[in-house]
Image (cartoon, grey):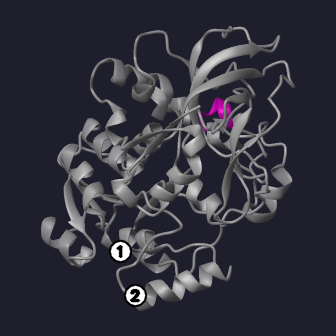
Amino acid sequence: MKAVVWAGRNRLEVQDVPDPRILNARDAIVRVTSTAICGSDLHLVDGYIPTVKKGDVLGHEFMGEVVEVGPGVRDLRPGDRVVVPFPIACGACFACEDGLYSLCENSNPNAGMAEKLMGHAPAGIFGYSHMLGGFPGGQAEYVRVPFADVGPVKIDDDLTDEQVLFLSDIFPTGFMGAEMCDIKPGQTIAIWGAGPVGQLAAASAFLLGADRVIVIDRYPYRLERARRTGAEILDYEEVNVLDALRDMTGGRGPDACVDAVGMEAHHPTPAMYAYDRTKQAARLETERPYALREAIMACRNGGVVSVIGVYGGFVDKFPMGTVMNRSLTIRTGQCHVQRYTEPLLERIRAGEIDPSFVISHRMPLSAAPHAFDLFKHKQDECNKVVLTP
């Protein structure tokens, strides 16, 4: 089959790779009908996530048609149309029973690798390094889906792929980012990052009852998409974000702040950006946490900082004194997608939201390397790319 593979730092290729096959009783094989490029894929392309190997198949946002199931899969059959969550979860361990699906204790066969870096291992993830299981991803014609009786959600109606595809990751991730803010009526939520996750976090914050949402970014086309959700916008290259947020909130600061940027944040000060960018390129640090630091400094006393941007290792110059002395709460995590798929599918069916508003480009799988370039370098106002095998 054809698949998008990692061929080295900043090198992707579409190659012929072996077709997947059933390995365990609870496996399914899914023929991919739609897949997408995620911002967190760029951390792999840029070489910041360890244990990625040449030939690894990328992609963790995908959906398609079931073509084969193992004997232990009772609720799926060939021909079923499914969206597949990016974390792989067994459904029966301590974490899964607590709804913490991205922390499944049974789905990561390489848990020992992750434990060396993180202390304990999270779940396996499609197409996201051997440290997180080494599972081939969904930017391919076919995918083996472990624990297929737990993850995939069936789509039985006439909703299009584009309406439901992002149930695999970015819609639940944005929603969880907003949910972790513990939003109450009348509150103001600030979101760093106007990419697809930030846009969906803004839309989700309004669904959950926020009075105001303020989104911070520097790209006009992304800020305009955020504005369409009802959010107010700030260009951090045009204003001092901390001063602007104080002015917009009567000096108090936002009630909660969402970091939807993660480890490769940009900084408006050239010298500061060059310093950390150089350290990161030389692997002397793993993160550029500008957005996270600013979110912490901006949040009102006693507020919540919700972190859904991806981080891979260790953060330099973390303002722990601010967190402790101002009684801030930090909540974070890879999204527990299986917890949200059915409720969010019902919101889509009810017409409360159509997540496809984030899509800017549609391309064949064969154009994936070019699509990644557009997405990474923000060319042609590229916001979100859907690939079709």
Q: Is residue 258 visible?
A: no
Is 348 drawn above or below residue 356 in the view shown?
Answer: above
Q: Is residue 329 visible?
A: yes
Q: Which residue is mark 1?
A: 297
Q: Position of residue 178 (x, y in %)?
A: 37, 46
Q: Quadrant of the C terminus?
A: top right
Is 308 drawn above or below residue 235 in the view shown?
Answer: above
Tell which tag, 1 or 2, sits nearer the viewer.
Answer: 2
Does residue 59 appear to the left or right of 201 in the view shown? right
- Residue 270's tag is 2
Residue 329 found in image quarter:
bottom left
Q: Position of residue 19 (x, y in %)?
A: 80, 29
Magenta residue span: 95-100
Q: Residues within 10 Å of mark 2 (few under 14, many from 20)?
A: few
Report the residue at 68% width, 8% height from top: 77
Is 271 drawn above or below residue 203 in the view shown?
Answer: below
The answer for how far apart the CA atoms under marks 1 and 2 are is 20 Å
> Between 104 and 16, which is closer to the camera in this rendering?
16
Report the residue at 84% width, 43% height from top: 109
Q: Position of residue 260 (x, y in %)?
A: 42, 57
Indicate the amino acid at tag 1: Met
Residue 367 found in image quarter:
top right
Report the residue at 36% width, 86% height from top: 269
